[in-house]
Image (cartoon, rainbow, N blue to C red):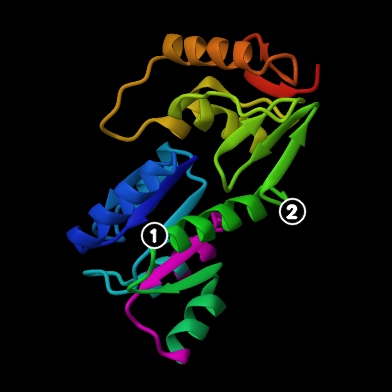
Amino acid sequence: MRILLVEDDSLVADAIVRGLSAEGYAVDRTAAAEPVSGLMEGTHYDLAIIDLGLPGEDGFALVRRLRRNGNALPLLIVTARDGLNDRVSALDLGADDYLVKPFALPELAARCRALIRRASAATSNELTIGQLRIDLAGRRALNPAGQVLELTRREWSILECLAHHSGRVVSKERLIQAIAGWDEDISSNAIEVHVSRLRGKLEGAATVRGIRGLGYRLEDI
C-alpha cells in the first residue's frame, strides 16, 4: 500500500519513512503542501499523512483544499499541536484521524492500517479469501493448516493490496505503485514474476487470477 507523507521536519520524516517502510508500505514524501495535488494526479495513494505546521500553505489549508476538490483519500494529521481547538478544526475540515507528536511508530502504523481498512470497507484486521487467512496487523498469511506462508516483503505487499480489493481487478500499474517508492524502478515483468511466486506460495488456499489486459484479482479457487 502506498502512503504520501507531507512533513517538513526531515528528522521526523526520515523516522516515519523508515518505520512505515519496515511495515511494508511504499512511502513518498514532500516537505510542502503545494505539490500535493499534482502528486496525487499521477499516483494512487491509499493514505496521506499531513503535518499541520508546513511552510507556505499549512496543513489545515491543505486538508480544506483536498476535500473541496472532492478528494476522498484518508487523511491522518500528525502534529505537535495538542490543543482541543486544533483537533476539532482538523477533523471538521475533513481529516480522518489526528495523532499528536511525539508518538510511537507502532501506534502510527496501527492508525494507518485502521484508516486504509476503513476505506476498503474491511471491518477487521483479519481477512479471509477462500481458505487463506490474512492477518493485516501481523503482516502474515496462513494456509488452511494454520501455517504461516513464507512471503517476501514485496510478495506480502502485493497480497495486501489484492486483499484490500478482494473480488476486484487490480492493474499492474497499481501493484507497482503499491510496492515501489519514487527511488525504485519496478517493471511490469517484475510484477509478473512476483505474482507468479506469490501464486505458488498460496498453496491452494486461494489464487491470484490474471485478467488479460487488465491486471490481477485475488479470489477463491
Give the alpha-carbon distance from disc 1 to disc 2, as whole Å. 23 Å
- From this view, report whether residue 135 is shown above or below residue 129: below
**Residue 105 circle label:** 1
Is 2 placed above or below 154 here?
below
Type of amino acid at the residue the image marks with label 1: Leu
Q: Residue at position x 76%, y 23% from top?
A: 219
Nearest to the observer: residue 144 or residue 68: 144
Element carrying mark 2: loop
**Residue 179 percent across, percent down from the top left:** 43, 31
Rate crowding at label 1 as few (under 14), some (14 to 19) or many (20 or more) other CA atoms within 10 Å: some
As rendered, which of 49 and 106 lies closer to the eye? 106
Q: What number of labels is visible?
A: 2
Left or right, 145 with reference to 189 = right
Q: Tell me the crowding category of disc 2: few under 14, some 14 to 19, or many 20 or more residues within 10 angstroms, Cα based.
A: few
Instruction: Judge whether residue 77 is colored magenta.
Output: yes
Note whether residue 69 is visible: no
Q: Which residues are magenta?
A: 64-84
Residue 45 x, y percent position in the rendering: 48, 44
Q: Amino acid at mark 2?
A: Thr
In the displayed structure, does residue 30 sit left or right of residue 142? left
Lateral position of residue 8 relative to residue 181, left or right: left
On residue 53, the disc is none
Residue at x 29% of width, y 69% of height:
57
Q: Is residue 147 above or below residue 15?
A: above
The residue positioned 47% from the left and 90% from the top of the image is: 84
| Residue on which the image places disc 2 | 123
- Residue 62 in which image quadrant: bottom left
Q: Is residue 186 visible?
A: yes
Q: Nearer the viewer, mark 1 or mark 2?
A: 1
Which tag, 1 or 2, sits closer to the chain's start?
Answer: 1
Location of residue 85 in the rendering, given as x and y in whole percent from the top left corner: 46, 91
Is 128 above or below relative to 62?
above
